[in-house]
Amino acid sequence: MTRVAAIDCGTNSIRLLVADADPATGEITDLDRRMTIVRLGQGVDRTGRLAPEALERTFAACREYAAVIKELGAERIRFVATSASRDAENRDDFVRGVLDILGVEPEVISGDQEAEFSFTGATKELHADKEGAEPLPWKGGGGRRTGDYLVVDIGGGSTEFVVGSRTVEAARSVDIGCVRMTERHHPGDPATPEQIAAIRADIEAALDLAEQTVPLREPRTLVGLAGSVTTVAAIALGLTAYDSAAIHHSRISHDEVAAVTERLLASTHEERTRIPVLHPGRIDVIAAGALVLLAVMERTGAREVVVSEHDILDGIAWSVA
């Protein structure tokens, strides 16, 4: 058993997992799992730089996480940074700050590496459950299937598409995410049909790019990851408080995702604040994230999505263990 700490720093949030990992059994036992909205990618799509206030919010979260890691006595730490820090001209400022606080250098990973971590984290448990499990129904059906799973990780700045069974067979990262789409198109309160159409056109163009590398229509099971997906699931399930156990491995239908997306796009900022499971840091970007998920389901023909609370963070933890 190895006690590890994994940190995933994305465009919208930074997350920590401290866990005991047992390579012999394939089990990870959570000791502490937490998330902080820091919006590191604030303005990056427009300026190409990390904003000073965004860096300070991120460093404040790092100082909190450093205290947790020390208290729990993690033997190994891995810090992975994704879309926003890949795109920023001044990412050296970010690297130096993290190194000073946590004593480890953040690894600014490629989209392909991000995809592999996400796939491992999302599917490791599903392998164990595969015997006797029914695959998800897909519209159209028939034909050869390339892999068991299509894992879709909808982040703040990018979305990763990964196909595979026990290992990755194809992966692609494209620059559509809830923060990037919101900042690029500035949807109103609520969004107008023209703004929705512009966001949708960006998403469809990105899906065309992804499909050049990843056979989106072939796998049997669609697995959705990250905050946009889990939030849509929580709303669809009618939860009055965020319940990770209820959300993890829930199956949300295409029609349910469509209904939630329509509701979010038609709502005002004030109306979204009254949705009990919606984190305050996602209020302004959740509609764009839901629209990405809906577009993916329509492109792939998936009738349902398996929602996973285990994702890139768990994949990072396994890479350390």
Image (cartoon, rainbow, N blue to C red):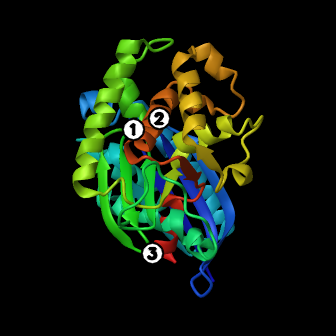
Query: Where does label 1 land, which residue?
Result: 177
Decide if residue 276 is on the left or right side of residue 78: right
Query: Where does label 3 land, which residue?
Result: 166
**Which secondary structure, mark 2?**
helix
Q: Is residue 99 visible?
A: no
Closer to the camera in the image, 36 or 197: 197
Closer to the camera in the image, 3 or 278: 278
For label 2, the crowd category at 10 Å Cα-Cα, with few meaning under 14, some 14 to 19 and many 20 or more, is many
Residue 216 sits above or below residue 23 on the image: above
Name the residue rendered at 40%, 49% in the picture. Answer: 97
For label 3, the crowd category at 10 Å Cα-Cα, with few meaning under 14, some 14 to 19 and many 20 or more, is some
Query: Which residue type carries mark 3?
Result: Arg
In x, y percent, where is residue 178? 43, 34
In x, y percent, where is residue 315? 49, 66
In x, y percent, where is residue 107? 35, 60
For label 1, the crowd category at 10 Å Cα-Cα, with few meaning under 14, some 14 to 19 and many 20 or more, is many
| Marks 2,1: beta carbons within 8 A | yes
Name the residue rendered at 41%, 61% in the picture. Answer: 219
Residue 116 sits above or below residue 34 on the image: below
Query: Which residue type carries mark 2?
Result: Gly
In x, y percent, where is residue 321? 52, 78
Decide if residue 20 is on the left or right side of residue 80: right
**Which secondary structure, mark 1?**
loop
Closer to the camera in the image, 167 or 208: 208
Please report whichever mark, 2 or 3, sits nearer to the chain's N-terminal start: 3
Query: Which residue type carries mark 1?
Result: Gly
How far is mark 2 from mark 3, CA to CA?
Answer: 27 Å
Query: Where does label 2 land, which residue?
Result: 289
Closest to the camera, between mark 1 and mark 3, is 3
